[in-house]
Image (spheres, grey):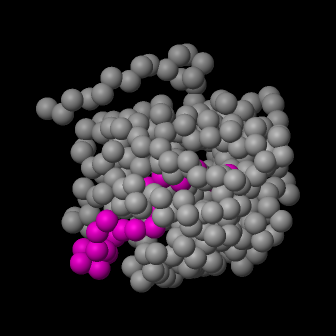
């Protein structure tokens, strides 16, 4: 029988589920669905924008298998608005964009959608991106675009991606299927009971254009990294198997992000899908701690490096 990790029970105040609601963002040529939670009775200190990976939905950041997993509820309790977006080609926009969009197009669409959000909602000190896997590429592309548009991002926190694949995706026949299960999840005991049943509603087909670009251009990281001007933190799970994260790879990544302050972290007892596992709370707390650092940088007039 798998050993279930001990997780401290949440105190009564934390066990109350914050209000998480569905909203729609207008991106001009399409609409994006999203999940939103906001701090109660106080303006937000900043907005955390969460971007899911390929073949997932925004609910990845609101894991329902255990109350400790949700970035949305945790962020709101710590004074932040959290906006988890269904990226272009997912959720509401799947019908309008059945083939999806490439990285540059997704960055443009997300930029427009966030413009719609900020026009109607208080954003505090600004926007901070938390992104997983392929969503990390979109986050980098968005940060590059943001820098060219004047800059409203505080920083990025990215998990589950580097600029070098650890496996040949073409040999696997794609990113999803029986042969890739261990790559996505790692040891099953890393996840609370009920995770895989509940995850069925989150898992969806990866849009054709997105998957084709990921297979054709696994090194697209470099195309956007040089233009990023805000601090970036990367997290690698103990059982990360999709992406290389050895010392040489990480050194080269930092070189590609020459205009940014780069932080690298490693998370024990976690698989690629960090935010759905027992380690989710530790990861989310570390991500929000990095946001606190970015707020300090902003307050002292520092950006990027």
Side of 161 where 130 appears, left or right: right
Q: Residue furthest top?
A: 12
Side of 304 where 239 appears, left or right: left
Say if 283 sits above or below 98 in the image. above
Percent across and percent down for residue 5 are 30, 28
Q: Residue at x 68, y 62 (%)?
A: 259
Residue 91 at least partly seen: no
Q: Residue furthest left?
A: 1
Q: Residue at x 74, y 30 (%)?
A: 40
Q: Is residue 146 or residue 19 the one in the foreground?
A: 146
Say if 174 sits above or below 200 in the image. below
Q: Residue at x 82, y 40 (%)?
A: 299
Q: Is residue 240 or residue 190 the one in the foreground?
A: 240
Say if 139 sits above or below 287 in the image. below
Q: How many marks?
A: 0
Percent across and percent down for residue 274 are 41, 46
Residue 173 on the magenta segment: yes
Residue 14 on the magenta segment: no
Snapshot quadrant of residue 3: top left
Side of 176 where 256 appears, left or right: right
Quadrant location, the N terminus: top left
Snapshot quadrant of residue 241: bottom left
- First to last magenta residue range: 155-175
Q: Residue at x 42, y 49 (%)?
A: 236
Residue 269 at least partly seen: yes
Percent across and percent down for residue 69 are 47, 37
Percent across and percent down for residue 157 are 58, 50
């Amino acid at each position: 029988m798998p050993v279930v990790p001990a997780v401290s029970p949440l105190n009564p105040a934390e066990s109350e589920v914050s209000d998480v609601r569905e909203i729609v963002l207008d991106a001009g040529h399409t609409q994006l669905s999203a999940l939103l939670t906001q701090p109660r009775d106080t303006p937000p200190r900043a907005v955390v924008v969460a971007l899911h990976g390929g073949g997932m939905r925004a609910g990845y950041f609101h894991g329902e298998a255990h109350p400790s997993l949700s970035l949305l509820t945790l962020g709101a309790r710590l004074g932040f608005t959290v906006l988890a977006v269904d990226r272009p080609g997912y959720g509401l926009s799947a019908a309008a964009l059945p083939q999806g969009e490439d990285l540059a197009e997704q960055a443009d669409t997300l930029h427009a959608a966030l413009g719609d959000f900020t026009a109607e909602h208080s954003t505090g000190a600004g926007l901070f991106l938390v992104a997983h896997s392929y969503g990390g590429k979109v986050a980098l592309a968005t940060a590059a675009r943001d820098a060219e548009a004047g800059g409203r991002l505080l920083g990025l926190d990215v998990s589950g991606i580097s600029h070098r694949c650890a496996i040949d995706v073409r040999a696997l026949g794609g990113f999803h299927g029986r042969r890739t299960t261990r790559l996505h999840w790692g040891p099953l005991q890393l996840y609370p009971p009920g995770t895989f049943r509940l995850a069925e509603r989150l898992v969806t087909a990866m849009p054709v254009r997105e998957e084709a670009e990921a297979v054709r251009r696994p090194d697209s990281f470099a195309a956007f990294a040089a233009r990023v001007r805000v601090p970036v933190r990367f997290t690698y799970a103990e059982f990360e198997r999709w992406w290389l994260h050895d010392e040489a790879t990480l050194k080269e990544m930092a070189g590609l992000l020459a205009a940014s302050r780069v932080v690298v972290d490693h998370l024990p007892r976690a698989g690629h899908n960090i935010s759905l596992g027992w380690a989710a709370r530790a990861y989310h707390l570390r991500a929000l701690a990095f946001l606190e650092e970015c707020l300090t940088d902003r307050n002292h007039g520092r950006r990027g490096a």
